[in-house]
Amino acid sequence: MSVREKLFGWMSRSETPVNNHEAVSTIENKGKGWTATPENSIDYIYRKLIIDTSRRASVLDLRQMDKLDGRVKKIHKKLARDSVKGGLKIVWKEKENKRITRLFNEFIRRLNLNRREKLESDVRGLVMEGNLPLQVVINKTEITAALRMPSETIVPNVSESGRIKDLSAAYHQVDPNSQKVLASFPLWQLTMIRLEPDSFDDHGSMGRPYLDATRSVWKKLNMTETDLVIRRRERAPLKLAHNLEGASPEELDKYKVDAQSAQGDVQTDYFSNKKLAVTAIQGDANLDQIADVNYLLDTFFAGSPAPKGLFGYVGDLSRDILEDLKKDYFEEVDALQDGLAFGYYEIFRLQLLLKGINPDSHKFAIEFSERQTATPNQRADLALKHQAMRVPQSMVWNTAGVDPIEAKNKLEDEGDLLNPYPENAVESSKQPNVTITPNNAPKGESATSVNNA
């Protein structure tokens, strides 16, 4: 039996059989009209191997916005950079299994997940397209790659109830032009990470890009800024109106040619043997009024994950309000980290199965090393508080943002080099005394004091 057949057999046993599930759904919901999407609606057509044109248009718009507008590019870049900071790590909920830890480190290296470029590429695809389909590539018993696929070409093979109809062909890649199926992927081979889908339980409901709702505002903002530049160019300079009373068309044309031929010179005086009036027309005095642009700019950044103050548009934004908006942004980053890490966790579970290890027999998780909701000082402060509560040392390290496995290995390698009380020194039985003073730090946070005396 091939590896593909073994994996498909395991997936089939771990999931509810499709026919039985549909039968149960039909019996339990008979007469209730329960479907994720009505069969007579146009949305149901998109579940029949046809690309959702509106979602594809949204993805193409976001790519164009990212290419043309530095603000959009900066939002995507900052989200990607902040989300992958520190890289991935394995967190044990029980005693560490060294074999699984070794397999995880090898897994990270093979898939280039130890490289910042790969992680940032995956996050940018997720926030720009709303979905991150990762195709698993297997060589014998090892996963060698997790390739990012263009999400606008992936169509879930689901029924009207939103459940996957065939585990051996859970997703199809469809040509956007001919609507021809290019390839089919079983459920184990394509890991789909969705960003805020309309219904998580509906596998046919795809995620949405972060800036999807701001597309119309961005188009208005771009148009208004272009109009503003044209207006300044056309109405800002001082203009002169020349009135030649009684001049014939030939005389007027000759005067116009003579006046325009001296455009490079500073014209201060005009001479004529006919009655001539030159009137100065002032430029637009309201060019500094750009409230409409500011309004559209505020509306655009209101729909983005980060406040505009983080991108240089400070204005009259107070520091306290900026701090609150930054906390909200950090929560968005943490949510991105959780979704992305779980996708890699699912792929690593498949790797353990290929090695003959049941992942459900071990309690572990894959997380990003650094969370953005807390600063390094706040993490260290919380770690000291946990230490004062006699929390296990591995959990203290994890709270401080330090990889417990790496820290333990370093301590074992360096030995007495990090021991504050070496063998030739007088041993002290006193443990560090950690004192916590509530409401003795900025914004009502507690202060921590460590005393080794």
Image (cartoon, grey):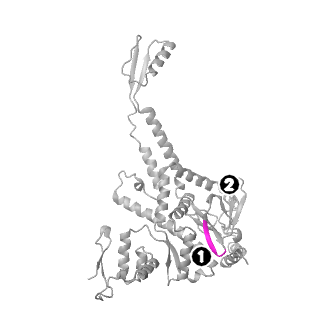
Residue topped by disc 1: 349
302 or 366, nearer to the observer: 366
Q: Main secondary structure of the magenta part?
A: strand
Question: What is the three-letter code of the residue carrying label 2?
Answer: Pro
Query: Based on the displayed image, in which of its 4 quarters is residue 277 positioned?
Result: top left
- In the rendered image, residue 445, in percent from the top left (x then y), is placed at 32, 71
Measured along the vertical axis of the image, is residue 226 above or below residue 183? Answer: above
Quadrant showing the C terminus: bottom left
From the viewer's perspective, tell me whether residue 400 is left or right of residue 126: left
Name the element at disc 1. helix
431 or 204, nearer to the observer: 431
Residue topped by disc 2: 176
132 or 36, nearer to the observer: 132
Stretch of the chain drawn in magenta: 140-146
| Distance Cα–Cα, label 1 vs label 2 | 32 Å
Q: Residues within 10 Å of mark 2 (few under 14, many from 20)?
A: some
Q: Residues within 10 Å of mark 1 (few under 14, many from 20)?
A: some
From the viewer's perspective, tell me whether residue 170 is left or right of residue 332: right
- Furthest-left residue in this view: 453
126 or 402, nearer to the observer: 402
Q: Is residue 303 visible?
A: no
Question: What is the three-letter code of the residue carrying label 1?
Answer: Arg
Quadrant showing the N terminus: bottom right
Residue for point 64% across, 77% down: 354
Mark earlier in primary sequence (1, 2): 2
